[in-house]
């Protein structure tokens, strides 16, 4: 059934999009295909964090996924696009704690249970916001299968994985130096730490010898440089390199720790770089990962000088209770006052900051849970050498993945948070025994569960298979849709997420989590800067949609998309995208208003097709082939360019304009034929466009004769070999070249199309002559000649403007308008252009590498171009000589 035609003269996205998404949901169009003979195709959405609104990066990410799933659905695949959200442990807890701080409350005031209730309320609020944004973007998600990383099924999968890895010895608990976020009061993995340049200093401090009679280089102290004097009270040794001849006599001596008086030894260890600084370093095992390893080798004590919030603890003496940076200032002053400070050198150095809270990270001695990475990394790397490998798009990111896996450290997975999957480990209150299991111990009153939760990425790593029902391997979804087909995500989380999904999937399912991973870049502002709150250059995609419509934003995001590359957002590009849709809208409006009695968009009998019909159908067929191919290889930018060229240039500017000649004529049979082809081409074009711009295509399609309830489930266009017509394309190319040449001459001579002029076409090519004669109606409509002559005997007027086209010369006598000097200048410009083209093609064809390696049809096309350009050059030279002779 055709919707009532309500197409204004201007594309209005608000009226087009209003209510459409709900209609799709009400019809259940986003659910998988009921026909289980269809080939499955599945995508799991990278789950957004329930911490706030979606940004432009999410819009880009989900647009590409929706394009893929919509196209596959139309192609008859059994498609599943599974939605969901991530609890985002640190990020979400930090947001809720910040909100509570504004109310003068801390999580400790509430207690764990009440605090978690507050976080669930936050989650529900922002999940609703994300749902609204997904709807506004037009995402064809199957909400009946929506998952959350803390729901019962996923929590069961997390416990299963933890216990399994623990029993295999791949999860262990140990005391190590970890990255510590003192604001969130939790451990961080290496990749949750962002390094940035901070202003700091090297503090050069005297460490006096315990033996007051001993001197070195005439001094009774050694010089130690540190950037962090606040950790000095954790010093347990000074180290030199074993082969450093300068300091051999110092090894075994003791020095006095400044400000505290504790005696610490001078030791020898391979870790020390003799070339750096003085070649002597202080060893602080509880506050530096390298010092921790040195301490283990020498059985040194570990002294932690800070509390969880980075305030100084009881080991810091009189500085206890002070903030770490306040303590640094106080200690520096005391070192200066007590003659320990030699000098202070200001520096700029790279310092780690928490990705979540932004505060400076501490290296802290802590008991944590870890995943042992050696075996899992090797398995992931070995898999990339098999047919079961994950295909990275672009493939250069496979090297990034492999490089990280080759150098992966053991993964600290425990977080000192309350929001998340609580670690399934219990400690016996009486014996201290540790129990790890999927369920709590039976005599639970004797056991206390570990208070830590798991790193968010631990549960996210299971997302492709846990969302499908695993660990129930008999789950219908798991059996049918896993492994998934394609993952679409940003290249910046290869380390965080992509790599972890790969090794966890291989470990627990024996299969890759997805066949392909399409990696896109970042969206930057017009100047190429990363969007951020601090720069104030962030763009809310919902604001963009309010102004331009979802389809406009989606077209921009898809058409500017090159795999692995960043794109720049600009309102000028949004204007251009809106203009393109407006062009489609008005072209469709014209077609619909001129369809007459057309009942359905099918092709008429081929015997009734004229040149323009055969040409547009051939061009449509090529476009179907190109767009399908470019989607298959994830080259959406090229797919967009093919669509734009066909729609704007071929269909709108030429076929529709030429159809007016038939539609306004008296031949009813020809008119019916043209109406039917207009309907067919528009129908197929809307189907090609639908995955990219679903709202406007659905509105137009429902407003014209159609078959089916919605474009969402309509059949995607396929290539029809019988429509391919090289002859029609060649002939139409000649006709368009003629019309463009005449328009150019008119424009140069300031002769408007409304004024009739004589038109002379000289050609020795009988086929070309016949083509022009058979299409006089189009030449007369688009060139407006008062007198039209075509043939080899046409005499070129002496005072005429001319153009050279393939196989013919075009003359328009405009004696009264021609300035010979201007015409000579114009012809000289034409000559230079043709000479440049000839030189280019000759150079290309003289390149043996090109000729030997390029496809034959490409080489042949270049050879044909050489013939045409040389012919045009020779005719132009002759015409230039003739005009100069008239001066």
Image (cartoon, helix red, strand yellow):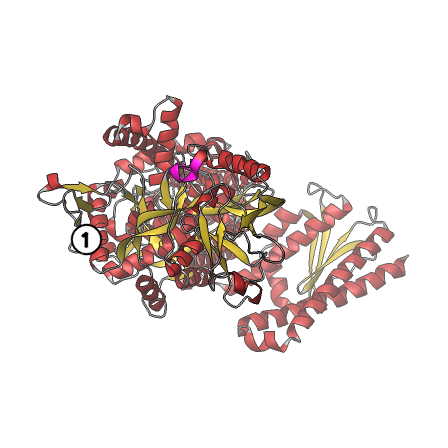
Does residue 347 appear in the picture of this structure? yes
Q: Residue at x 66, y 63 (%)?
A: 806
Does residue 538 appear in the picture of this structure? no
Q: Is residue 223 left or right of residue 869?
A: left
Q: Which residues are drawn in magenta?
A: 306-317
Q: Quadrant of the N terminus?
A: top left
Give 606 or 452, whichever is nearer the viewer.
452
Q: Secondary structure at mark 1?
A: loop
Q: How many marks?
A: 1
Q: Quadrant of the C terminus?
A: bottom right
Give 572 or 271, whichever is nearer the viewer.
271
Give the quarter of the image for residue 750. Answer: top right
Q: Residue at x 34, y 32 (%)?
A: 126
Q: Please check the rendered image and state whether residue 216 is part of the magenta-colored stretch, yes or no.
A: no
Q: Main secondary structure of the magenta part?
A: loop
Give 413 or 289, whichever is nearer the viewer.
289
Question: Where's residue 864, x and y in %?
Answer: 62, 70
Give 226 or 190, whichever is nearer the viewer.
226
Q: Is residue 445 left or right of residue 593?
A: left
Q: Please check the rendered image and state whether residue 316 is part of the magenta-colored stretch, yes or no.
A: yes
Question: Where's residue 814, x and y in %?
Answer: 79, 49
How crowded is the residue under tag 1: few (<14 C-alpha within 10 Å), some, or many (20+)?
many
Looking at this rendering, what residue extends furthest in the front direction?
213
Give the quarter of the image for residue 755. Answer: top right
Q: Which residue is mark 1?
A: 471
Residue 627 in the image: above or below residue 599: below
Question: Where's residue 235, x and y in %?
Answer: 45, 49
Q: Is residue 280 left or right of residue 702?
A: right
């Amino acid at each position: 059934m055709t919707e009532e035609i309500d197409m204004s003269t201007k594309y209005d996205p608000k009226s087009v999009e209003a209510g459409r998404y709900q209609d799709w949901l009400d019809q259940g169009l986003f659910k998988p295909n009921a026909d289980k003979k269809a080939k499955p195709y599945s995508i799991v959405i990278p789950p957004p964090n329930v911490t706030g609104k979606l940004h432009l990066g999410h819009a880009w990410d989900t647009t590409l996924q929706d394009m893929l799933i919509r196209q596959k659905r139309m192609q008859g695949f059994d498609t599943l696009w599974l939605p969901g959200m991530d609890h985002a442990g640190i990020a979400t807890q930090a947001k809720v704690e910040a909100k509570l701080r504004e109310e003068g409350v801390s999580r400790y005031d509430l207690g764990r249970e009440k605090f978690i209730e507050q976080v669930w309320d936050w989650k529900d609020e922002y999940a609703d916001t994300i749902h609204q944004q997904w709807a506004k973007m037009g995402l064809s998600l199957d909400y009946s299968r929506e998952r959350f990383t803390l729901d019962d099924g996923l929590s069961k999968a997390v416990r299963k994985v933890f216990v399994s890895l623990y029993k295999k010895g791949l999860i262990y608990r140990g005391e190590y130096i970890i990255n510590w976020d003192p604001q969130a009061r939790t451990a961080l993995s290496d990749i949750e730490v962002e390094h940035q340049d901070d202003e700091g200093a090297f503090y050069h401090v005297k460490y006096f010898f315990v033996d007051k009679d001993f001197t070195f280089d005439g001094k009774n102290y050694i010089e130690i440089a540190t950037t962090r004097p606040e950790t000095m009270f954790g010093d347990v040794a000074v180290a030199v390199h074993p082969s450093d001849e300068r300091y051999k006599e110092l090894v075994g001596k003791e020095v006095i720790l400044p400000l505290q008086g504790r005696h610490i030894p001078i030791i020898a260890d391979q870790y020390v770089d003799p070339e750096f600084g003085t070649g002597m370093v202080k060893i602080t095992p509880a506050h530096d990962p390298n010092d921790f390893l040195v301490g283990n080798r020498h059985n040194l004590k570990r002294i932690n000088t800070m509390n969880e919030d980075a305030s100084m603890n009881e080991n810091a003496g009189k500085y206890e209770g002070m903030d770490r940076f306040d303590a640094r200032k106080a200690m520096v002053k005391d070192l200066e006052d007590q003659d320990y400070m030699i000098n202070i050198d200001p520096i700029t150095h790279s310092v780690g900051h928490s990705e979540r809270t932004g505060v400076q990270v501490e290296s802290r001695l802590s008991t944590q849970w870890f995943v042992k990475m050696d075996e899992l990394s090797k398995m992931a790397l070995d898999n990339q050498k098999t047919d079961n490998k994950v295909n990275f798009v672009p493939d250069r990111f496979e090297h990034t993945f492999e490089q990280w896996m080759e150098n992966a450290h053991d993964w600290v997975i425990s977080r000192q948070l309350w929001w998340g999957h609580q670690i399934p480990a219990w400690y016996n209150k009486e014996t201290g025994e540790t129990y790890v299991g999927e369920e709590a111990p039976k005599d639970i009153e004797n056991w206390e569960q570990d208070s830590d939760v798991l790193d968010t990425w631990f549960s996210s790593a299971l997302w492709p298979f846990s969302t499908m029902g695993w660990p129930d391997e008999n789950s219908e979804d798991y059996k049918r849709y896993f492994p998934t087909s394609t993952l679409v995500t940003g290249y910046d989380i290869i380390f965080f997420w992509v790599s972890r999904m790969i090794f966890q999937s291989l470990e627990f399912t024996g299969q890759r989590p997805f066949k392909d991973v399409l990696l896109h870049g970042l969206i930057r502002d017009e100047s190429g800067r990363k969007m951020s709150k601090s720069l104030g250059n962030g763009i809310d995609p919902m604001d963009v949609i309010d102004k331009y419509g979802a389809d406009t934003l989606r077209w921009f995001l898809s058409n500017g998309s090159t795999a692995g590359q960043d794109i720049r957002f600009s309102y000028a590009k949004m204007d251009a995208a809106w203009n393109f849709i407006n062009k489609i809208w008005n072209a469709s409006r014209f077609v619909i208003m001129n369809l007459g009695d057309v009942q359905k968009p099918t092709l008429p009998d081929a015997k009734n097709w004229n040149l323009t019909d055969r040409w547009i159908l051939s061009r449509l067929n090529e476009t179907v082939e190109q767009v399908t191919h470019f989607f298959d290889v994830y080259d959406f930018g090229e797919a967009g360019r093919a669509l734009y060229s066909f729609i704007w240039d071929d269909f709108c500017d030429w076929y529709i304009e030429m159809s007016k000649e038939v539609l306004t004529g008296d031949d009813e049979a020809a008119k019916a034929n043209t109406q039917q082809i207009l309907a067919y081409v528009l129908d197929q074009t809307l189907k090609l466009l639908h995955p990219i711009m679903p709202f406007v295509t659905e509105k137009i399609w429902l407003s014209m004769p159609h078959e089916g309830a919605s474009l969402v489930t309509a059949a995607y266009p396929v290539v029809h070999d019988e429509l391919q017509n090289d002859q029609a394309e060649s002939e139409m190319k000649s006709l368009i070249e003629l019309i463009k040449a005449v328009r150019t001459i008119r424009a140069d001579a300031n002769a408007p199309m409304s004024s009739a002029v004589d038109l002379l076409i000289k050609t020795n090519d009988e086929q070309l002559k016949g083509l022009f004669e058979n299409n006089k109606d189009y030449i007369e409509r688009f060139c407006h000649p008062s007198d039209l002559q075509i043939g080899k005997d046409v005499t070129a007027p002496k005072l005429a403007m001319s153009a050279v086209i393939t196989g013919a010369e075009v003359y328009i006598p405009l004696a009264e308008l021609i300035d010979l000097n201007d015409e000579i200048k114009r012809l000289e410009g034409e000559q230079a252009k043709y000479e440049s083209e000839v030189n280019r093609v000759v150079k290309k064809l003289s390149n043996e590498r090109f000729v030997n390696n390029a496809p034959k049809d490409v080489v042949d096309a270049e050879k044909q171009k050489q013939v045409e350009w040389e012919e045009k050059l020779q005719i132009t030279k002759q015409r230039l000589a003739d005009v100069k002779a008239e001066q």
